Amino acid sequence: MANLTPSEIAQYAYQAGFRGVQLVTAVAVALAESGGNPLATNTAGNSAGTDRGLFQINSYYQPQVTSTCAFDPACNARAAYAISSNGTNFTPWSSYNSGAYAGFLTVANGAVSSVSGVISTISAAISKLFNAVFGTTITQTFGCTSLGIETPSSSCPSGFTHLGVDYAVSAGTQLPSLINGTVTQAGWNPNGYGNSVTVSGTNSAGQTVSVLFGHLQSVGVSVGQAVGVGTVLGLSGSTGVSTGPHLHVGQQVNGQWVDPTSLINSVLSGSASTSTSGAGQNIAVGLPVVGGAISGIGDLLGKLGASLPGNIWGSFLSTLGENLKTYLTSGLILDPLFVYFG
């Protein structure tokens, strides 16, 4: 794998959660630590362990970061975000403590500025998608319930538990992925979820995280497909054991069902933030979608993606554009609406 450019590092760091001045600092630290080499290793001067990957994460002091994660720049950046207490503390890195990172701040600031327009556009687009789904009313929470159609549970006084959170999403709403990962299930689910999609990935702690969307009207991805946060997985509906149109969101961590509320809130918080260093203005482009026919948005995103060959945003934009064109021009969404970036 070739060394990453400063702009590519900025994109990985942004996806991991770094923002504003912290994003610039993160890029500078990564350049000082590894020179942008995602496969870099170092033991010189270490009292224990090996420094690995983009942010040179030590195997001894950060054992939760697996080798697979350490040498994947996206996962390495997410781990760095967690280690830095969400971008607020860079003292775990020697290049920060010694001041060596400061020599890369000018380059880092330029890199962040160069990608800020793309970041702003994507952030706004993703924010619109998420708010349309997770800004709706929660109709059922995670945990014990008196509804007899739910999963039997001996630990609940009622005898039943709800393994997820339900949102009152209108049928035909586009459903964006909550995590980066690979589609591990897509299609009819015999466990009452009707048409469903499950995306699985690894978090910065090395845990396997899976997110299930249930009761879909239609599925737009296939098993084995790589997706990112914001990739449209399908359209909401009321298939399977369902009393009406809604979205069921279930989350497993290392095979155990957990309440997905924290994950959803963290994604909403991250996607709503479009403020980055060097990007002070909003991009406002109104694109009408009328009677199931889309006007420009899919092509626009596709062109943006094509203009970034080999770029981590490029594939996302192209996929998002194609998904929008597929879902909207198919007539699955019939109501007039406006999509705004900015």
Image: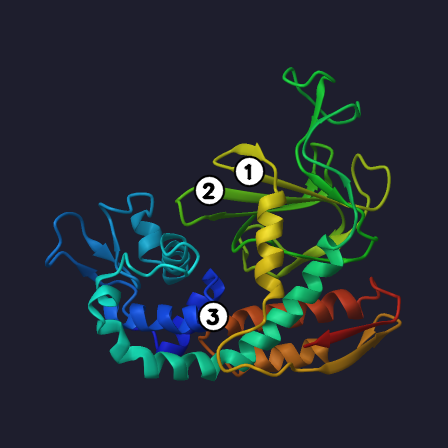
70 in relation to 3, above or below: above
For the residue marked with disc 1, what is the amino acid? Gln
Report crowding for label 1: few under 14, some 14 to 19, many 20 or more residues within 10 A (C-alpha): some
For the residue marked with disc 3, what is the amino acid? Ile
| Picture residue at 40% right of the left edge, 60% below the top | 88
- Residue picked out by circle 1: 252
Query: Residue 40: percent from the left, percent from the top?
Result: 23, 63
| Picture residue at 62% right of the left edge, 51% below the top | 265
Q: CA distance from mark 3 to mark 2?
A: 22 Å
- Residue picked out by circle 3: 312
Query: Residue 39: percent from the left, percent from the top?
Result: 26, 62
- Residue picked out by circle 2: 208
Q: CA distance from mark 3 to mark 1?
A: 26 Å
Between discs 3 and 2, the one toward the N terminus: 2
Placement of the N terminus among the 4 image quadrants: bottom left
* Marks 3 and 2 in Cβ contact (< 8 Å): no
